[in-house]
Image (spheres, rainbow, N blue to C red):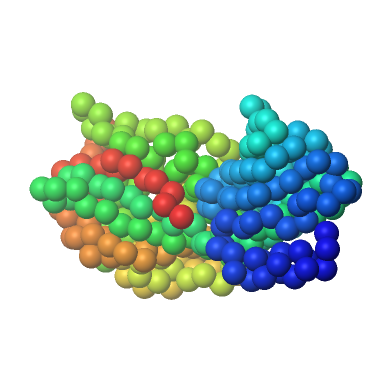
Amino acid sequence: MTAFASRLCRLATLLALPTVLAACGGGGTDNGGLFVSQMAATTLQYSRNMVITVTGSGLDKGLKVTVDSGCGEVSESAGGDALTRRFTCKVTAIGPKTVRAYTANNLEAARLQVTVPEPEVTVVLQGLDTATSSFTVKLDPQAAPVSVNNFLDYVNAGFYRLTIFHRVVKDFVVQAGGYTAGTFGPVIKTPTSPAIALESKNGLKNVKGSLAMARTSDPNSATSQFYINTVDNPALDYKSDAEPGYAVFGSVISGLDVIDRLNAVPVRVDLLSGLTHLPVTNVVIISALQTK
């Protein structure tokens, strides 16, 4: 590449959009006929597969793609040709990342800067009001990676669809993720993944609006059930190994008024299931979707 072309390449890098970048390093005599005209990345979401699309010419002549960090192993998708090829990798960390395309001679052909935001999940409810209601939680994978990954696995598998809020203790917590509504009362929904290690010693507190993993008396027993604090609950925080508390891994960032209304619903004792704070009217999760 000539000095003039190199200067143009640097200028293009400065002016490029964050997820689409014109190629640098194409042309010349040492690239084996491979030229990248554009590279783009989609599905920039923590815990999901980022899709990297490369377009140009001669892409069947040894094109390689790498991500500098936080995206697992990069693998090429089937069906690529000389003009377009796609690659994927599972995002394992939030923040900025650099995607690079190389020729067979290990010459950098294009570079792309992307940023993965903190993950968010939006939950849509039915039964709380005459219409549907929703709230959104932001997750903290840096403080609680095990809990966040576990929760997102359940979210992205569709596990929470049609589960209910089965425990509402006024001015304490609202809890969900373990039961569906049956004809004769709540029905246990069996978790699909093993229990996870407790992450309560992570600096996050059980304050109003915080999201945490529910568990049994065994500290390392959390699976699919989660709760949201409706008031500040310092008694649930980590104090010592003898009093490990409960692991907070996110917080409600919109729809806290929905949680306040849920906190106030009438509850009853259900003798068949043994639940003591079951809402009189089922509050059903219609969907829980990762939105960032």
**Image height of 231 relative to 262, above or below:** below
236 on left or right of 168 = right
Q: Looking at this view, is 119 or 37 the one in front?
A: 37
Question: What residue sits 89% from the left and 48% below the top?
Answer: 30
Q: Is residue 291 above or below residue 234?
A: above
Asked whether residue 204 is in view, the answer is yes
From the viewer's perspective, tell me whether residue 216 is left or right of residue 41.
left
Q: 66 or 34, which lies in front?
A: 34
Q: Position of residue 82 (x, y in %)?
A: 70, 33
Near-viewer residue (120 or 283) = 120
Q: Quadrant of the N terminus?
A: bottom right
The single residue placed furthest to the left in the displayed view is: 130
Query: Looking at the picture, how far across and down is residue 182, in whole percent?
Result: 25, 29
The residue at 28%/41% (across/down) is 286
Vertical relation: 11 (above or below) 214: below
User: Is residue 86 or residue 275 the one in the foreground?
Assistant: 86
**Residue 73, percent from left and from top:** 73, 44
